[in-house]
């Protein structure tokens, strides 16, 4: 069976090798050299040798906080409005979708241009309201939010379609009954729509958090792999990539990838445990 | 619903449609303008000459960008990788899905759950060993190296299997009585009946490979083997703020996907609600 061969060589074997290498010192050229827990200890406790490990985690968490709630709210608003029996539903869907099918690199090019301090559309737009221009991608206070905004823009269509599927699954009778009881639109939304959308919201929350934790492509090309300015966009995977392919510390990078895996498992577990997902 | 709230809804939907689509139109228009116009006047819906106000489209930016990087070659590379990877995925995943759905073999359930569990593992965990393995298979810095490691996908097998389980088994029983071989049944009954799910898997595999950046980034060195996203990324680091080149390059990367999307939109929307999105 081809799948079994494929799975063994390209999935199972790498998982095991990666785990083994995370306990070694390896540069991909010479043979790996067993060092036990040294890689993990260096990452977690040696801030002199690994000054960016914890800061990169913090940057990633900040990115998630900026990206995920805004993305969910925007997707939900678009889905709700699209679901209110309007004309041209398909046309709007098409429009919201185009950013999603586009390569992250092309989107990064497009937004770099829009964010440009001198000729960019965003500063020109602000100037129209006499607002001061900003150096969006080169200022430590705006770089990460600007990149998060770009991702929200790109991902809105995906969330919208998932929410829309959830909304179409809510039986119309519930709303009719609520209207007879005299519930207004807001009460209907708060007491019917939102609780019934919980499983869908939960799915989106988990997938977007996991995806955002692994953000890399856009930031890599926008900052030439440096995560600048002043490491303000130096996310976890960028650190991992640099350890592996700039400094050739493959063993250390494998250890980082397993730490990432554990973090993702823990986040997923917490969300399963503490975020209500059942419909009451 | 009263008129005012309806108007408000349309207003919000239309403004967001504009926010999502206008940047692409500005980009296309800017890529067709004279370079100096991009740097001196703001965004335009149409490539207009700022002095005469008439349309003046030019392909100069596209010509210049191909002198920086072999964009034609990169386009063909991207197409080759995406098409071959999609074909492999469709055939091998469907074959495996059929086996998991219909054929009994030892440890079937155990193998299937092990494979599903592997979906939890982030790509970055296996990335480094994958480079090493691909290198040892003699495929480092080659297009085949881009294809083979993604030529199958457990997730797609799972999706197709779920679909095949729903196909009535009587069809196959009748075919077996007529003396059809297993492969014949798979090829002439299962594959045609699975068209809806195969369309979804196909389009998403194509999109994933066309847009993939990380894997080519760690595997490819020679310019002649660049894919479009990789080349565009290199152009960004190389030529900083030369927007007339960057926007032309980005347009070349985006247009084919947009055309496919407009043709296949129905399957893409269905695929997302199946949860068939990676990354």
Image: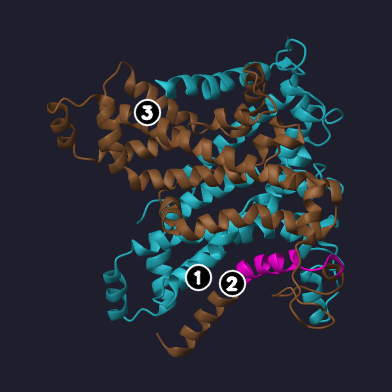
Residue A196 position in % (x across, y down): 38, 60
Mark 2 or 1, closer to the camera = 1
Quarter where residue A242 is shown? top right
Residue at left offset 34%, top offset 45%: B195
Look at the image and tell me in which quarter the N terminus of chain A lies: top left
| Chain B color in figure | brown
Residue behind mark 2 = B16
- Give the chain letter for cyan: A
Query: Which quadrant holds residue A184?
Result: bottom left
Q: Is residue A207 visible?
A: yes
Disc 1 is placed on an element classified as: helix
Q: Which residue is rendered at x = 82% and y = 47% of the image?
A: B68
Q: Is residue B19 above or below residue B85?
A: below
In the image, the segment drawn in magenta is B18-36
Residue A146 shows in the view = no
| Lateral position of residue A247 relative to residue B10, left or right | right
Q: Does residue B58 appear left or right of residue B270 in this picture?
A: right
Residue receiving disc 3: B96
Numbered disc 2: secondary structure: helix
Q: Which residue is mark 1?
A: A92
Residue A3 covered by magenta stretch: no
The total of numbered circles placed on residues is 3
**Is there a contact, CB below 8 Å, between mark 2 and mark 1?**
yes
What secondary structure characterizes most of the magenta part? helix
Question: What is the secondary structure assignment of the residue under circle 3?
Answer: helix
């Amino acid at each position: 069976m081809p799948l079994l061969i494929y799975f063994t060589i390209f999935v199972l074997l790498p998982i095991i090798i990666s785990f083994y290498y995370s306990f070694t010192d390896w540069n991909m050229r010479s043979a790996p050299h067993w060092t036990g827990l040294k890689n993990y200890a260096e990452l977690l406790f040696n801030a002199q040798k690994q000054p960016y490990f914890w800061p990169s985690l913090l940057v990633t968490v900040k990115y998630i906080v900026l990206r995920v709630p805004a993305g969910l709210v925007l997707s939900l608003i678009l889905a709700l409005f699209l679901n209110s029996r309007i004309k041209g539903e398909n046309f709007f869907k098409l429009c919201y979708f185009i950013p999603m099918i586009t390569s992250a690199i092309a989107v990064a090019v497009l937004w770099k241009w829009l964010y440009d301090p001198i000729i960019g559309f965003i500063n020109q737009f602000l100037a129209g309201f006499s607002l001061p221009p900003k150096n969006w991608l080169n200022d430590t206070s705006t770089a990460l939010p600007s990149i998060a905004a770009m991702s929200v823009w790109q991902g809105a269509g995906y969330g919208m379609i998932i929410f829309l599927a959830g909304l179409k699954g809510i039986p119309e009778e519930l709303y009719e009954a609520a209207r007879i009881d005299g519930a207004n639109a807001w009460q209907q939304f708060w007491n019917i729509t939102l609780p019934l959308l919980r499983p869908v919201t939960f799915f989106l929350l988990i997938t977007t958090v996991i995806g955002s934790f692994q953000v890399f492509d856009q930031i890599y090309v926008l900052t030439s792999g440096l995560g600048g300015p002043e490491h303000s966009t130096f996310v976890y995977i960028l650190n991992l990539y640099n350890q592996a392919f700039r400094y050739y510390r493959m063993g250390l990078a494998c250890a980082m990838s397993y730490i990432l895996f554990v973090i993702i498992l823990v986040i997923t577990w917490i969300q399963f445990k503490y975020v209500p997902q059942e419909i009451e | 619903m009263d008129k005012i709230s309806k108007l408000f809804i349309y207003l919000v939907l239309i403004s967001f449609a504009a926010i999502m689509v206008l940047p692409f139109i500005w980009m296309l228009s800017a890529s067709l303008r004279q370079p100096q116009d991009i740097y001196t006047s703001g965004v335009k819906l149409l490539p207009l000459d700022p002095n005469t106000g008439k349309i003046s489209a030019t392909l100069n930016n596209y010509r210049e960008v191909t002198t920086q990087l072999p964009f034609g070659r990169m386009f063909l590379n991207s197409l080759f990788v995406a098409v071959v990877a999609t074909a492999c995925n469709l055939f091998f995943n469907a074959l495996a899905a059929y086996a998991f759905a219909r054929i009994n073999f030892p440890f079937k359930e155990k193998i299937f759950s092990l494979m599903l569990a592997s979906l939890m593992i982030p790509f970055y965990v296996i990335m480094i060993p994958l480079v090493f393995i691909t290198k040892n298979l003699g495929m480092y810095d080659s297009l085949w190296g881009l294809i083979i490691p993604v030529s199958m996908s457990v997730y797609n097998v799972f999706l197709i299997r779920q679909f095949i389980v729903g196909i009535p088994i009587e069809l196959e029983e009748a075919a077996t009585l007529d003396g059809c071989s297993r492969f014949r049944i798979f090829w002439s009954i299962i594959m045609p009946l699975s068209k809806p799910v195969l369309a979804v898997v196909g389009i998403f595999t194509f999109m994933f490979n066309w847009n993939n950046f990380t894997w080519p980034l760690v595997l490819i060195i020679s310019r002649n083997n660049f894919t479009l996203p990789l080349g565009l990324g290199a152009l960004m680091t190389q030529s900083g703020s030369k927007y007339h080149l960057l926007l032309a390059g980005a347009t070349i990367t985006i247009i084919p996907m947009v055309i496919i999307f407009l043709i296949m939109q129905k399957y893409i929307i269905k695929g997302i609600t199946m949860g068939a999105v990676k990354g």
